[in-house]
Each structure stands twice: as structure tokens, then as C-alpha cells.
Amino acid sequence: MAFDIEMIKGVYSRMTERVDAAREIVGKPLTLAEKILYNHLWDGNATKAFTRGKDYVDFAPDRIACQDATAQMALLQFMQAGKSKVAVPTTVHCDHLIQAKQGANLDLKRANDVSKEVFDFLASVSNKYGIGFWKPGAGIIHQVVLENYAFPGGMMIGTDSHTVNAGGLGMVAVGVGGADAVDVMAGMAWELKFPKLIGVKLTGKLNGWTSAKDVILKVAGILTVKGGTGAIVEYFGEGAKNLSCTGKGTICNMGAEIGATTSTFGYDASMERYLRATDRNDVANEANKIKEYLTGDAEVYADPEKYFDQVIEINLDTLRPHLNGPFTPDLATPVGELGAKAKENEWPLKVDWGLIGSCTNSSYEDLSRAASIAKQAVDKKLVTKADFGINPGSEQVRYTAERDGILKIFEDLDATIFTNACGPCIGQWDRSDLKGEEKNTIVHSFNRNFSKRADGNPNTHAFVGSPEMVAAIAISGRLDFDPMNDTLINEDGEAVKLDEPKGIELPPLGFDVKDSGYVEPVEDGSNVDVSVSPTSERLQLLTPFQPIGKEINGAKLLIKAFGKCTTDHISMAGPWLRFRGHLDNISNNCLIGAVNAFGKKTNFVKNQLTGEFGGVPDVARAYKAAGVKSVVVGDHNYGEGSSREHAAMEPRHLGVVAVIVKSFARIHETNLKKQGMLGLTFNNEADYDLIQVDDTFNFVDINEFAPEKQLTLELVHNDGTKDVIKLNHTYNQSQIDWYNEGSALNLIKKENAS
């Protein structure tokens, strides 16, 4: 039986009335995304048609999911909200704080020792406030959500950018910062700019070596890392129906890498099969009653150009397998062409590791397809040339795959089976085969491949592919290996060719698990004690931010970031994950990965008070101690990547008042607003070039901060000359209220106290 079945029935019971009302108001057929959005309006039935990409709208999500790294700060904030229980079903999943090193058993034991304080805190807070808790080792948040909580037509938010994975089961699932999640936990509306809509029509059927992963690798190559910003991507067509549910999840998961608000698919037979296989017959039965409301209207899919803002068409019959990378997930290359491109760019051809898993590709089907290739290596007497690492997506997947002999196939190749956790995908990897910054290549089935992402080495060239392609490349040990055309020499000196992969959509004997790792909260948590030691290095109770105010003069440039500046550059993961619950300690990694435009070095900026150079956090702390405000300047798509709000909270904590860039990634822009900061964009992108290393910033008319009104900035250069430029913003009045109060959380507390 499903979790929260009465809530799901409630969503479905109102859907026909609300969607019909919306269709009448809008005056045309609706996409699936629009049906879900209009069914979740905070104010009930639609009374107006919202303008895509312009109108801010209040929504009422059905549920929230948090992972352990971001949950710490989110729950520390919720503890200040004055509530006794979360207002909507919420879960916490411990998957980020487990480092991959020796294998599942030893790694999990070590994590439980090293992070005991954090896990105990999360467990006790969850128990106190009515939050479902998934223990370390239970699985990766998004696989667990797909198996247990996702449902067609639902809306959820999660404190992880890959919350979008649940679109594989027909949800509108959106990654948000912790402050957004706290709003909804506290019973408030969730605000989102009404998204634009991108339609992706899939025709044909996957065949041979091509997988669902290749669909999103192809889309990423078309749209780039910012092409989906502010939009929901909706997949449709016969090709979409031919994909498995977990394959759909893979596609939606990596939609985060094109900047999309989320991605989704209409309810179909593959979703029904998955619901029934995961013991949710009750959800499937309810969905079948209104299934025409759980997909886009037929008129939309028949003439998509009339209803979507952009339409892409991909023929699965002719789609080729891809490997994307290095250093960015949108550098798409068909496998047969990668060798030439690698030689041209001097990318290392020798592959050292093949890594399979992550929230993107860790389902039973994923493991079975990769295992079909791994088994051939054993049967055909091939010696694997690269190391193998496997992260199953959940304890249910791991237990079932072990029962069915899938894991033994990998073990026969000396693969390391890591914990059911994120591991190398988020930098939680103690990689023993390399020291320093040696140039090398790895292939993985993850979603992101930014510099330093997996192992902290800026010279690790990471390429993203499907699990089966990763297996083939790892067996060959060569980046230029094309399994569709090339042969390998086995132990007997024979040339052998790998056969096409074969996968099993769902386990023939059904899923099974001995201990899922789920802990149900007590009904009344009022007597549950939650304590945080004042001397803890891992956890710190929060002090409310003070409002920045109506006057900003004499602010100093902290850093002018050059080129790509993701949340990994702003607030690194990896070893820094241990401080995610301690704002002051984790602020010591603030912007240390960003490249300074002046000198092109990382973590090396000028302190204008002394004239000396130092690390970004050190200079920021010096400014703050002297009562001097500071400003960060950035390039395009600033803050792309993770939903981590630490990338906003750390600069705020260190005295940064404004971040001025050419363009923002959606979640990061919202996170800055939530923390009571200024997130601004250049009206003229060329004004980025006016910023000099010794600049002072005067915000001339911040006292007149208002919606749809530009701000004026005076730049005072070291030689006394000045430039006056215009800055744009997307703040509405509610968001300006956050700024005026010091943060969104401050406003919540004020409203709850009144």
C-alpha cells in the first residue's frame, strides 16, 4: 500500500473540476504540466490564465523530500518557524554523507561513526516534527522517492536539484532551496514564476546500444546547460510511451543539467506497471480512474507548436549512444566520434574508472543492462582494464539485484559495490588510485561532470553515459572504444565483440527487501528532545540575518567570477559536506572554487582595506569585521547545478549584500532572494567588463527598490573615475518584503508571532 494514499485521493478528487475550470479560463487545450500546475493553485480553481515566464504564482505542493546534506540547514530553519509539525508529508533521506572507499559494509559503518551527530540530529528532528526518516544505507533520495512516494499528477518540491527525477512517474517535481521547503513545511504557499513550456516529441523506439540516458544526453547537447531555464520540459509521443518508467526518470533527472524547472511525462502503461511492481496498486487504480487528466490533451500532442514555447523532435529509431563531457554535461558526442575529438583536444584516452549508479541510473533495469555487458566480459574471457564501482539506488534495488544474481556478475569482475548512496557522484569518493592533480579520464552514469566534481582533481576528465556504455568502456579501458563496431582481444588472443545489452524492466520475481531503512515518526513529537551542542563543529543553531537596509554605499568588490561559476564553485561538496549544518564553518569554503577574473586564480582576491591578497572567505570576513559591505560579480548562468542554499547563505553570512551577474540559474536566484540579498543582472551585459579590481559600489536608489523598476549602480574606480550603470531584477513585492525583513524566514516568524 502506498504512503499517504488519502492525500493522493484528494489530489485526484479535485483534479477534474480544477482542470476543466482551467481549460475554460485559458481557452485552449492543456499540456500535462499546465494541468498539474492549475490543479495545485494555492487559491483553488483558476480565475485567470497565467502568463508563462512572467506571472509569479502561489502553489500548494503535495509533499517535500530532503536529503541529509541540505536537510540540516532546512530543519535548523524550520525549528525557528514556531510550528509543532510539518504541514505536508515530508521525508528526510540520508544519502549524501556516506563516502565511497572500501565497499558498502565498511563505508556505511564508517559513515555512521563519523556523522553520528548529524544522523542523530536529523532522526530526532524528523521524529519531533512528523517527518519520515530514511536511515543511512536506505538508498538515494530520488530512487527511494520514485519507489515509494511519486505519483502521476502530483506536485512535490525537494531540497535537491534532482528532485525532478520524480517526473518519470508523471509528477511536477521541483528542486528548491531549503528556505522554500521551510515555507511549505510551515503551511505557507510555494511561489514560482509560471514556467514556459518546452515540448519534446519522441518517435520510434530505442534499440541496440541506445538507452533512455542517450535521450537526455542528446537534449542537453541541443539546449545546453541553460536552454531549459524557466521552463518545464514535457516529453510525449509514441517514443515516450515505449520507455520504461525508470528510463523516464533518468531523462527527467538529468533535466536539471539543462536548467529546466522540471521535466515530466504523461501517465501511461509503463508507469502503471511500475506502480504495481512497487506495491502501489491503490495508486494505479486511482490514477486509472482519471488517466485522461494525467497526460496532455490530445490536441496538444497532435499540434504541439501551437501549445509549447519550443518543440524538439527526436527519433529514437536513429538516436545514437552518446558520451557527454568533459567538464560540462552538455558537450554531447556520439560514441563513434569521441575518439577523434579526444585526440584533437588531448583528452586522456586511457580510462581509469567506470562508475555506475547515482540518482540518475541506479534502478534494477539500469543494473541489469550493465550486468548484461559485464557478464560477457567473464564469458568471453576479457580482462577488465579499468576499475569498476557500483552504487545501487536503494536497499530494495540492492537486495533484489543480489537475490537475482546481478551483483555477483559485477563482483566476478572485481567491481566494488558501494553503499546505496550518492558516493562519487557528489564528490564523496576517497579515490586511492590517484594522487595530486594527475591528468586522467573516468566514465560514469551520473548527471554532472564539472571540474573537481567526483574526486576533487581539476584534471579528471569525466564523461557521462548510460550504465551499459560505461560498462563497455570500462572493460575496454579506452575512451575511443566503440562497442558497436570495435573488437577486444581476450585472454586467448581472440578478437571478440560485445553483444548488444539486454535489460529487465522489472524483476520477474518482484521486488523484495528485508529492511528498507524507513523510520516512521511518532504521532505526538512534543516530548522528543532535539539538542545541538554549542561546541559542535558539525551543527550550529541559526541566528536571524539582519536586514541589509535602504542604504548601500561604499561596498567593496569581493570577487569578479570569471566564466562558469556553479554551486560547486561557490560552496564545494565533497569533504565540506561535514559542515552543512554549521553555517560559520562551511562559510570557509565560500567561493574558493570560483576563478577570479583578475589574475585567473581561484581563492585569491584583493583586500581593498590592506592592499594584500588572500582567500575569498578571509577577505570577506575582514570586510565584515570592519563593517564594510561586499559585492560578488559573475558571468552567465551563475549558480547552476545543485539546489544547495549554502551557496546563498555563506555569502550572506560573510557580509555580501549583492550578487550581480549576466544571468542566473533559477534555484540560486531564488535562494539569494530568500536570504534577504540582492540578486541582480546587468541591463547591459558588457557592463561586466567595467568592473575593476579596486571598485567601490554605491546603490544610488536602493531606497526606491520596487517591482519592475531598475536599480542604479555607481561604480567608483580606484583612479576616482566613475561609471553609472543600470541593473535589472525579478523581485515581486513579496520578495522585496523578504529583503526588507532580512530573509523570508524572518517574515515567516513575524507572521506566526502576530
Image (cartoon, rainbow, N blue to C red):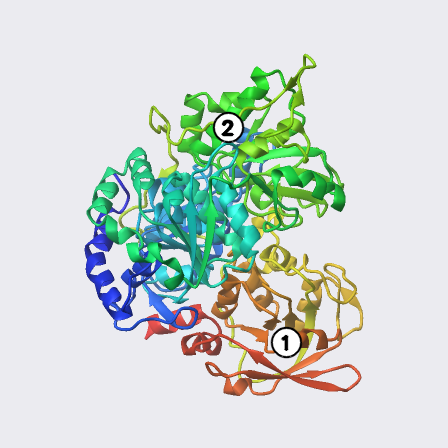
Q: Residue at x 51, y 87 (%)?
A: 704
The percent position of residue 573, horizontal first and vertical second, equals 59, 50
> Between 486 and 270, which is closer to the camera in this rendering?
486
> Between 435 and 47, which is closer to the camera in this rendering?
47
Among numbered discs 1 and 2, the one appearing first in the sequence: 2
The percent position of residue 330, horizontal first and vertical second, equals 59, 51
Q: Residue at x 46, y 43 (%)?
A: 250
In the image, 229: left or right of 692? left
Cα gap from disc 1 to disc 2, whole angstroms: 58 Å
In the image, 722: left or right of 44? right
Q: Which mark is residue 27?
A: none
Residue 25: tell me if it is visible: yes
Q: Is residue 750 above or below residue 715?
A: above
Residue at the extreme top: 492
- Residue type marked 2: Pro
Q: Which residue in the protein does label 2 denote?
A: 501
The percent position of residue 627, horizontal first and vertical second, equals 65, 77
Residue 297: tell me if it is visible: no
Q: Is residue 561 above or below residue 282?
A: below
Q: Which mark is residue 629?
A: 1
Which quadrant is the C terminus positioned in?
A: bottom left
Q: Residue at x 66, y 32 (%)?
A: 481
Numbered marks: total: 2
In what element is the residue under mark 2? loop
- Residue type marked 1: Lys
In what element is the residue under mark 1? loop
Which quadrant is the N terminus positioned in?
A: top left
Indicate the quadrant where residue 138 lies: top left
The percent position of residue 19, horizontal first and vertical second, equals 24, 61
